Amino acid sequence: MKRIFALICLSVLFVSCSTSKIERQSMRSLDGDWTLTDISYPGSSGLVDVTLFNTASMNCFQNSSWNFVSNNNTGNFVLYGSDCPSGEQNFAWNIETTESNTYNFTLKPLTKGVNPQKINKGYSMEITQLNDFNMTTRQTVQYNGAPFIVQMEFSKNR
């Protein structure tokens, strides 16, 4: 009887802590190489140059290369341009379904030699579109002391 109760408790714990089927499908769709094709600011007039992910300006991210690995939730991006940071920028990522059935996408920059669990800084975005070919994210950042939306359009490399 104790074994059955322990097995039931373990099963409930496993199911409650696991990733949902929808989240796993989303992670598999994200797996692979992508190009950041467009960055826009919905609801804003004019050109605004914000720093994305505390790394570089919007111009550096235009046409940047991204790689997502779904089996360990890591990846990297490479920026292009003479005034942009060079080399791969590594990150950990995660997708969670919110109460309103949208996807929350979290990206956490990784530092070489530092355990990712000890890094407490990350960036949260909403995935507004995700399929096997395209992804759109929206991130709310602060610009001149006010909330500001940055929308990023990705295309999967084939």
Image (cartoon, helix red, strand yellow):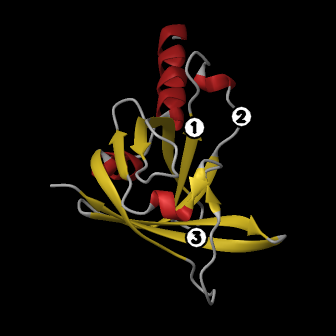
Numbered disc 3: secondary structure: strand
Query: What residue sits 43% from the left and 46% below the top?
Result: 20
Q: Which residue is mark 1?
A: 109
Q: Which residue is mark 3?
A: 150
Numbered disc 2: secondary structure: loop
* 5 vs 81: above or below: above
Numbered disc 1: secondary structure: strand
- Amino acid type at circle 1 is Pro
Quadrant (top left, top right, bottom left, bottom right) of the C terminus: bottom left
Answer whether labels 1 and 2 touch (C-beta < 8 Å): no
| Residue 55 in the image, given as x and y percentages of width and height | 60, 47
Q: CA distance from mark 1 to mark 2?
A: 10 Å
Q: Which mark is residue 154?
A: none
Query: What residue sits 69% from the left and 73% below the top?
Result: 148
| Residue 24 in the image, given as x and y percentages of width and height | 36, 45
Judge the density around disc 2: few (<14), some (14-19), many (≥20) Cα neighbours within 10 Å. few
- Amino acid type at circle 2 is Asn
From the viewer's perspective, is the residue at label 3 or at label 2 nearer? 3
Answer whether labels 1 and 3 touch (C-beta < 8 Å): no
Q: Earlier in the sequence, mark 1 or mark 2?
A: 1
Q: CA distance from mark 3 to mark 2?
A: 22 Å
Q: Is residue 158 left or right of residue 87?
A: left
Q: Nearer the viewer, residue 11 or 81?
A: 81
- Amino acid type at circle 3 is Val
Q: Which residue is mark 2?
A: 120
